[in-house]
Image (tube, helix red, strand yellow):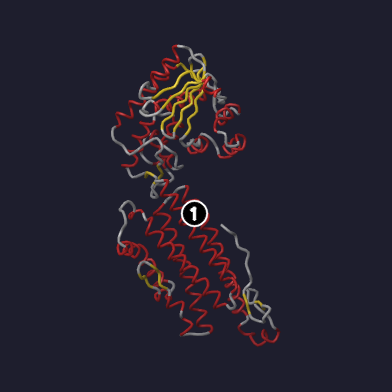
């Protein structure tokens, strides 16, 4: 601590001495050392050698994924990007040097990108009102191949960029704003009649990049990117992402999938085909109702309206999902006509209590039809929930992957039953002989230790 105090040349409050004046003073005196500028959670570390900027580090803001953005722009292929990621081991400062060493980016472009990044960071810090600064003699060991920059030239461009933010006026966009495509936007963005500048921003938005990251990769001032995003928002091509909401949404849906998988695993000890089918019905109906509860909290048209009456949420869910259920019942699975919506939930009581009315093969047939119908409806509900809430996004792809694993478990259970049905059909004329020989279908009507028929345990993949 004492060494740090001796190493410190000056410090102070940004309200007393602004960043512009500090940098000019250090340039005129030809100082060598590191200037630390703090404001809230953000810190800017500027390394100077003989009054010129030789490196800069920005802490407290997310670091843009340059490799992903270059891939989105078609300037780098995925294989090369992966090779660089492995070589850098998560150190973003090594990305540009490797691109240059491999001949995938020219030294001039590297210098241009490094200069732009420095200017953009200083431009952002010039707008800080509250905060502190301190200048130390020691240089930070920051890795960079940037040629030294003249402070006056950097300040001139940084001030111009800061003025652009002021000219923009009131806007909801900040440098940490994340935008993404609306679900309706086609991947063929080149066919949309927009200038290349707009197309580039739109392509990068599909990767859910921050405004700051988009500005860095395109080497376009942040305020200019904000204007372009505002126009794309007006054209209904993008939307602004609430990352906190998406985190909660992702967690909630993941919990539903995990709980549904757990419920499915529990019914794996069924003692008969009827019980096995009944377990599938219970699993899928519980999962569907979990999705309804979730969607009542995160549906796009219900967001931002405060706490809504339950009756309004129920009406919304019925408008969205009752007609598809009725259509499935009329066209394919009549048994679903016995299911109904009650208070925004799917009520399958009549299906679950069918054993009080029918027995044997007829009960099994009703259950089998219900399984097929609910499986189709479950897929439909999840697809609609995901499309509405997150659209074509990274979060959507994550959830789709987890959902695929769960559906594979459902499909595996259904397949086992289908094998049993096929066996039963082909052996219909030989029942007496089968009983005499003690042949048991491979589907899972296996003899347990107590002599009862049971289902085999299938290997399940956990999420």
Residue nearest the viewer, comparing 377 with 449: 449
Q: Quadrant of the N terminus?
A: top right
In the depicted structure, whether residue 42 falls above or below residue 21? below
Displayed quadrant of residue 107: top right
The residue tagged 1 is 399
In the depicted structure, whether residue 353 falls above or below residue 108? below
Residue nearest the viewer, comparing 176 with 338: 176
Residue nearest the viewer, comparing 422 with 376: 376
Q: Residue at x 36, y 35 (%)?
A: 226
Percent position of residue 92, x then y = 54, 33
Instruction: Check the image and name the residue furthest to the front.
Output: 2
Percent position of residue 228, x then y = 35, 35
Percent position of residue 231, x then y = 32, 38
Residue nearest the viewer, comparing 360 with 200: 360
Q: Residue at x 42, y 25 (%)?
A: 122
Q: Residues within 10 Å of mark 1 (few under 14, many from 20)?
A: some
């Amino acid at each position: 601590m004492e060494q740090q105090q001796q190493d410190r040349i000056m410090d102070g409050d940004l309200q007393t001495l602004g960043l512009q004046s500090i940098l000019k003073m250090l340039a005129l005196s030809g100082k060598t050392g590191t200037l630390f500028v703090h404001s809230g959670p953000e810190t800017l570390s500027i390394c100077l050698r003989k009054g010129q900027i030789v490196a800069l580090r920005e802490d407290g803001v997310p670091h843009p994924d340059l490799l992903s953005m270059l891939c989105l722009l078609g300037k780098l292929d995925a294989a090369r990007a992966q090779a660089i990621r492995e070589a850098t081991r998560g150190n973003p400062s090594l990305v540009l040097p490797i691109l240059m060493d491999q001949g995938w980016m020219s030294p001039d472009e590297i210098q241009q990108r490094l200069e732009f990044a420095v200017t953009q960071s200083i431009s952002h810090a010039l707008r800080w009102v509250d905060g502190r600064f301190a200048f130390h003699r020691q240089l930070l060991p920051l890795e960079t191949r940037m040629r030294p920059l003249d402070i006056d030239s950097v300040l001139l461009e940084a001030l111009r960029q800061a003025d652009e933010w002021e000219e923009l006026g009131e806007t909801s966009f900040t440098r940490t704003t994340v935008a993404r495509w609306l679900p309706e936007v086609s991947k063929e963005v080149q066919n949309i009649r927009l200038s290349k500048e707009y197309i580039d921003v739109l392509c990068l938005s599909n990767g859910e990049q921050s405004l700051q990251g988009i500005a860095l990769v395109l080497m376009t001032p942040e305020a200019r990117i904000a204007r372009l995003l505002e126009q794309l928002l007006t054209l209904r091509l993008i939307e602004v992402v609430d990352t906190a909401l998406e985190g909660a949404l992702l967690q909630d849906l993941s919990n539903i999938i995990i709980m549904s998988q757990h419920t499915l695993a529990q019914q794996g000890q069924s003692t008969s085909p009827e019980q096995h089918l009944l377990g599938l019905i219970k699993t899928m109906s519980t999962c569907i109702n979990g999705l309804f509860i979730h969607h009542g909290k995160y549906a796009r048209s219900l967001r931002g309206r405060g706490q809504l009456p339950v009756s309004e949420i129920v009406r919304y869910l019925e408008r969205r999902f009752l007609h598809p259920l009725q259509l499935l019942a009329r066209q394919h699975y009549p048994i679903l006509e016995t299911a109904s919506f009650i208070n925004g939930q799917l009520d399958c009581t009549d299906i679950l209590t069918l054993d009080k009315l029918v027995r044997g093969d007829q009960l099994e047939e009703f259950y089998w039809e219900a399984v097929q119908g609910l499986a189709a409806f479950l897929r439909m509900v999840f697809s609609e929930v995901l499309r509405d809430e997150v659209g074509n996004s990274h979060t959507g792809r994550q959830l789709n992957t987890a959902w695929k694993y769960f559906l594979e478990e459902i499909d595996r259970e259904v397949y086992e039953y289908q094998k049993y049905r096929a066996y039963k059909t082909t052996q219909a004329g030989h029942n007496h002989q089968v009983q005499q020989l003690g042949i048991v279908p491979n589907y899972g009507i296996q003899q347990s230790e107590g002599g009862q028929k049971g289902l085999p345990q299938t290997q399940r993949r956990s999420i």
